[in-house]
Amino acid sequence: MYFETIRSPGLAHLSYLIGDGGEAFVIDPRRDADVYLEQAGSEGMRITRIFETHRNEDYVIGSRELAERTGATIHHGAAAPFDYGESIREGNTFDAGKIRLRALETPGHTDESLSFALYDGSTGDDEAIGVFTGDALFVGGVGRTDFYPDRPEQVANLLYESLFDKILPLGDQTIVYPAHGAGSVCGAGLADRDFSTIGYERHHNPALQQGRDEFVRERLNEHHYQPPYFRQMETVNRQGPAVLGHLPTPRPLGVEAFVEAASAGMLTIDIREPEAISGALVPGSLAIPLGMLPSFAGWYLPYDRDIGLIVAHPGDIEPAVRSLVRLGYDRLVAWLNEGLHGWEMSGREYQTVPALYAGELKARMEGQVPFTLLDVRGRSEIEQAAMPGATEIYLGELPQRLNEIPPQRPITTFCGSGRRSIIASSILLQHGFAEVEVCLGSLAACKAVGCPIDYRD
Amino acid sequence: MYFETIRSPGLAHLSYLIGDGGEAFVIDPRRDADVYLEQAGSEGMRITRIFETHRNEDYVIGSRELAERTGATIHHGAAAPFDYGESIREGNTFDAGKIRLRALETPGHTDESLSFALYDGSTGDDEAIGVFTGDALFVGGVGRTDFYPDRPEQVANLLYESLFDKILPLGDQTIVYPAHGAGSVCGAGLADRDFSTIGYERHHNPALQQGRDEFVRERLNEHHYQPPYFRQMETVNRQGPAVLGHLPTPRPLGVEAFVEAASAGMLTIDIREPEAISGALVPGSLAIPLGMLPSFAGWYLPYDRDIGLIVAHPGDIEPAVRSLVRLGYDRLVAWLNEGLHGWEMSGREYQTVPALYAGELKARMEGQVPFTLLDVRGRSEIEQAAMPGATEIYLGELPQRLNEIPPQRPITTFCGSGRRSIIASSILLQHGFAEVEVCLGSLAACKAVGCPIDYRD
Amino acid sequence: MYFETIRSPGLAHLSYLIGDGGEAFVIDPRRDADVYLEQAGSEGMRITRIFETHRNEDYVIGSRELAERTGATIHHGAAAPFDYGESIREGNTFDAGKIRLRALETPGHTDESLSFALYDGSTGDDEAIGVFTGDALFVGGVGRTDFYPDRPEQVANLLYESLFDKILPLGDQTIVYPAHGAGSVCGAGLADRDFSTIGYERHHNPALQQGRDEFVRERLNEHHYQPPYFRQMETVNRQGPAVLGHLPTPRPLGVEAFVEAASAGMLTIDIREPEAISGALVPGSLAIPLGMLPSFAGWYLPYDRDIGLIVAHPGDIEPAVRSLVRLGYDRLVAWLNEGLHGWEMSGREYQTVPALYAGELKARMEGQVPFTLLDVRGRSEIEQAAMPGATEIYLGELPQRLNEIPPQRPITTFCGSGRRSIIASSILLQHGFAEVEVCLGSLAACKAVGCPIDYRD
Amino acid sequence: MYFETIRSPGLAHLSYLIGDGGEAFVIDPRRDADVYLEQAGSEGMRITRIFETHRNEDYVIGSRELAERTGATIHHGAAAPFDYGESIREGNTFDAGKIRLRALETPGHTDESLSFALYDGSTGDDEAIGVFTGDALFVGGVGRTDFYPDRPEQVANLLYESLFDKILPLGDQTIVYPAHGAGSVCGAGLADRDFSTIGYERHHNPALQQGRDEFVRERLNEHHYQPPYFRQMETVNRQGPAVLGHLPTPRPLGVEAFVEAASAGMLTIDIREPEAISGALVPGSLAIPLGMLPSFAGWYLPYDRDIGLIVAHPGDIEPAVRSLVRLGYDRLVAWLNEGLHGWEMSGREYQTVPALYAGELKARMEGQVPFTLLDVRGRSEIEQAAMPGATEIYLGELPQRLNEIPPQRPITTFCGSGRRSIIASSILLQHGFAEVEVCLGSLAACKAVGCPIDYRD
């Protein structure tokens, strides 16, 4: 049996290619689907079926892209209307060589959510060897249940039943293959490890230690952010995403041509490292370091604008394109071909975001001189450790809540380690704020140097 | 100045990516054009212009493919009707940074053939540093002039004038960048080296040592084969080839599915090494070892049939696809996923082509037992060294001339080293001939062991 | 937690790189150890400890190679004398970040065999999430126990206790990470899948369904071959293998130079595909197709001779070198730079091994004309399905048992699918046998076409 | 004929792999010599000879490294004492297949300098097709002649004779293959192109337009910097550099371990981009952006200290290691495994180098507030365009001339585009200077915005 986990960093997305007897299945493919073709091809396997555990709201489904190049059949749950593919029901089975997948309807995260139990016919098909749980069960957590705001209690109960009546009964020996790993926005408290078993989760997954009432209550009390692009993903994934054929190829542009394109409406996204952004930044650009694109691009970027990139190395373009295409941003038209260095040589103005290390921040917090400490972390993080006197605005919501920023200057942005802060700083500069700083190191460093921290728990 | 030669083996095709100041030009791109995008991108150069030295008859022009993904302008000669791109004329110049290209009309090989003199403005633009000669001047040879059968003398004279009046006057210091290297079907006698200068060619290129009359006479006496696909290339290149977007992805098929597809009309091409073909061969398949595809696929394959591949390793599929796509074969639908090994295990019949080493051939030639020695080399090769008693049929023409094969058996196929022989053997088997052998080693080995050879010169 | 399985095909060897908090452990590294360095490096992890589950007899241990370049400490079991590294005992624990490994003494396969339970401190360290079982427990099988011929019963009992008293008690939730997958010579009946759990194995692993007496009896009845190189591996691994620094680089040699080296004592190994070997073979060479090297090179090759390779493509050299270096063959001095094609062109003699498809074999078996069918499969395979009238000599033992071959000619070699047969054919040719054929397809094909087969069970 | 130019960026070093008939030569190999082995191997060529055009002073000769793994013979000029290899003399020839190299003694740059004329026997061996000129003739320039301070006139005359009496007489058709391209420290005024011909150079190379007297006078007037490591290179290359076997593998260290190693004497080199260095910098570290390592590491780094790297991405380590190993720095022991981000999170102090764009610099230059503009460009650059009021200290000499820095603060470092400035800024911070800024953009930007510039010419 061939089994391969394909990880898409940033999204913390996990997809799976499994095969036997020259035939292969893909579970939850991503949109830049070349990886499945290459791996299956090198193993001499033909991809015949694609399974979607659910509609997905955090990325563009890759099944149509993959089906276009393989002729494979797309399968998804029957409880939601899709404009493509074939619906399947509880108990449907699908074989490739000695492999068998059996569908389990496991609603809760979404109505049409499916799980797929994996059997190896060559060693015994009475017990599952694994289960693809989609966003129902994660390692260390469970799926979020806030996508049906009009019936939150009902879907939390559905998830409870899916977990306790469908998935756990597969047995302790069953390996868990979820659709997301640590860092995903699709669940809370995920472990920093992407493999586990039903047995281990049954004992250690906090959500599985709860009775039904406690489980439902906790789900209702969870707070999850919903980036605006989720809505687009939901629509696109239901209707069937556009088939790309190949990745967009942003064109290298010199400084003049880049500026011209920006004047004509192209958005400028700077994906360099936080320190480099701190050092020099093109005025008007939105800075989202490469690794943060999957998590934050969807909060700010519209779908009807061209996008131009500023990168440290040409080699960063492809991963950026992959990250953005997974979120449905296909209008990636340009990159600044000599980077900041070219910009600097052109004589054009650039901005800087002075960095403040934790020791300085501590001194400032303990001193008398007024300044604004802007903490852009999420609600659950701040609940655990808040910064006294800080203005708290979640990073994703910053553009809408700029009016909440107090008048004291400078503004020092703050988050868990400094990466989100630099995004915040660039947003402030975009909107004309002056004296914008960044605390590289942020909370992690503050803990190390003993800043005043309000541990609210 | 950025300068890179991109070689397409087999076709012996040379294309060029040059650039300066963030802008790049491509001369004679191939159809699988990703290489230009990748290289230009990694240098931060935008491809703005594509130059075709001539319409080309031996491969599908890649300019439309590349233009589609770059927005570049396509340029070609004015003396032939193209359905796309922009015509240019003698003396037109094109600048990228300090680079200047100047067009020279150099007809002869084709009417619209252009050459491009290359100047480096940073060191002096009075003398060319190089010249892209297309199929007018090669290292060690000149372009063939047999594409206008109704006016052969005229075009040979045109080529003479292009060479002596346009290209040579650029000066001895000029480096020659031709469109083909050794092994190309677009010229005769090419040197086994793809760099030279006007000065060196002026003294050593045999064709440039001739006066006009001798030059024209020799051109008229040259014999070149014209594979049937040349006509297709000419039409396609004039009208504008279909844009692929990405390479076709043949699907891996098991033995049963592969046989079924073949029954439904798919042609089977076996691209393994000659020895492996000799060892075991699927009945009905056409064997063309991977490296021979560019030279011989165009002789046999129609454009209206699906094609399925038999390969030794999955890694051979991509180069095969590239080779075939360059010849315009896009219907590459399948490959046999377990190769010959899977076929053998299925219990299905396979054929063999017993190999004969030169020592045995010599004994047989000197003995009394009748057999058929089938020499499939080209006319010019046989003129230099013929095999006594051999039946001579050029490989490309073999399917049309099977009736010339004498009745003696076995039939031992023969060529320069054994590679073309194995193609011939597979064609004979396809057409029901029995007792088909192959002389691996062929003429090279025969010379080494002292076979009787008729040196006709 | 970083977790990566590194597979070495052929040996069916599995090693593991795990890490957390910038620190990494490697379990059972292979000798070409660059892969661990590269992966750990790209994750920013420093390899600090290397664990050997046991001395290993089927490959050269890679721990010294890896320690040399990382400074890591090597750990192995205390019950055998090693000339390097540090011994550990039951219950010793080793932490990297939140990862904890706990050693279990699990003798049986060898005296000093260890297993390592894996705990994730971030989710709960009361239950193991996985266990590295070395050669004690495989997916679908258990380790062989025939390495102490003077006390077979004792070691079988030891293995029973290791499994039932040490490993199974870790709990059904524990994922099993063995040192070998399907195809290994270190155990019998391994599943074609390299992941499982204690729970699944407890129910489906045949050996774990047995009581102690049955378990011991079955171990004693198992038959395993012991290639001669096992002895060398045992010695080398105990003393500490030579550190290579980098892979040997065989030099490309032309035909003349290659022949000269062979005359001076270099062994010639042909690693091409079976069909290519069948088509043409250098006299005197030993043919072992690339994928078979890990399993069969150790049966035939001495350690005190230079080795020269014949390959189809230069790209095959590196995997061949890796395979041979893992077995301790470091004197890889040359390869034939133009392959068989160059040999053929030189006019030198080559041999052929005519291939027989199953339909022909069937006819021959049912006919009256005598011939020798030489079945080189292993004892357990033949026990399941024997060929009537065949001479049965296990492939590994063929050079020592040539005198058992009957006088009838031709000799048709036979195995499971044809790959081992071609090795056998080359050995016969090396020893002067004439009329040597190969049945490509062998048993698999015979079943398909309905050859007479004696199903002994 | 196989011909490949291997470029080593930074050093602007060009080496060549040429071959025919299965045999290959390498001219001026670099120390990380794997590239030659890989390319020759994939072409089936055995490297039999290695030619050094001269002893080289700007990098460690790679011939011993390559000879160790190939068995090739090393050749160099007879006029200097080498402790290894074989000397050759004017007129010695060396053949590989149809290729012939003929040695020309071309002293001037160094006494033992050789050039090698390249002939292609298959097209005519009466005229050279190319010439490997080492550091005698470059494209657009000639070698420096300041390595024998006691007889400058004599060596300038020698170079003149080598050029005019040995190299130019090879004829206009000869392609020039120098040992360095634009950006090398081994010559002045090199063209931004690495191909040319004798004919083109004869007309356009400024040095070749001069009579003997003018030529010699100009050589004597040229000013070249001599980094301290040149002396080490000279000694090492004469005696024979240590053979590495494989590249050093710096170990990833966490912040604590890295700090500890630094305390124990390890030097910290930060190779990130200038903007990132500007944003945040580890106190005490020397910042040399990756691309500047070949040019500047040799000015500052001693050979008897361990070196630890700070990088933006693990992928930058290998090119940094290659760059440093080429300069003889083999003690590359560590890298900071989480980069600046990890450092920041540790709470440790970091420094910043505020960046000033040209518009601000202009305002400051035109204003009254005192500050120090520190121009670290070379003498010849400043001669063309000086900054009024600037303190001029060449970057390489900065550590020795810190006492020349005036007391005005801030100190704004300045160069051609900002890359050397950031090195200067880090050196100032290392030595305790406060208020250190950097002008990213520097002269290029100043020209664009109209800063006051003193064009001295």
Image (cartoon, coloured by chain):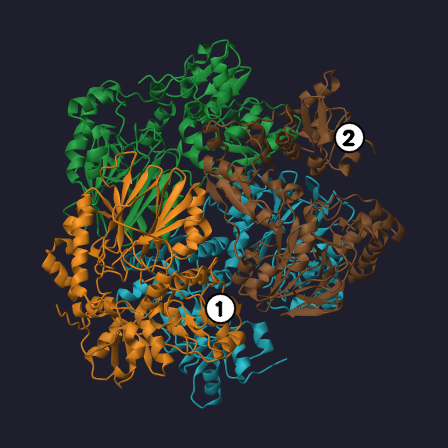
Chain colours: A brown, B orange, C cyan, D green
Residue B194 in view (yes/no): no
Measured Cα–Cα span from mark 1 to mark 2: 60 Å
> Within 10 Å of the Cα at label 2, are there few (<14), some (14-19), or many (20+) other Cα atoms?
many
Q: Which residue is drawn at 28% across and 80% down?
A: B401
Q: Is residue C118 above or below residue D395?
A: below
Q: Which residue is drawn at 83% across and 34% down?
A: A457
Given residues A332 and C439, the one toward you in this image is A332
Q: What residue did someone put label 2 on?
A: A386
Point out residue A59 in the picture as x, y percentages from the top left corner.
65, 51
Given residues D180 and C257, the one toward you in this image is D180
Given residues B438 and D395, the one toward you in this image is D395
Element class at badge 2: loop
> Within 10 Å of the Cα at label 1, are there few (<14), some (14-19), or many (20+) other Cα atoms?
some
Quarter of the rendering occupied by the N terminus of chain A = bottom right
Say which quarter of the image contains residue B378. bottom left
Q: What residue did someone put label 1 on?
A: B333
Q: Is residue A20 left or right of residue D440?
A: right
Point out residue D447 in the picture as x, y percentages from the top left corner.
41, 24
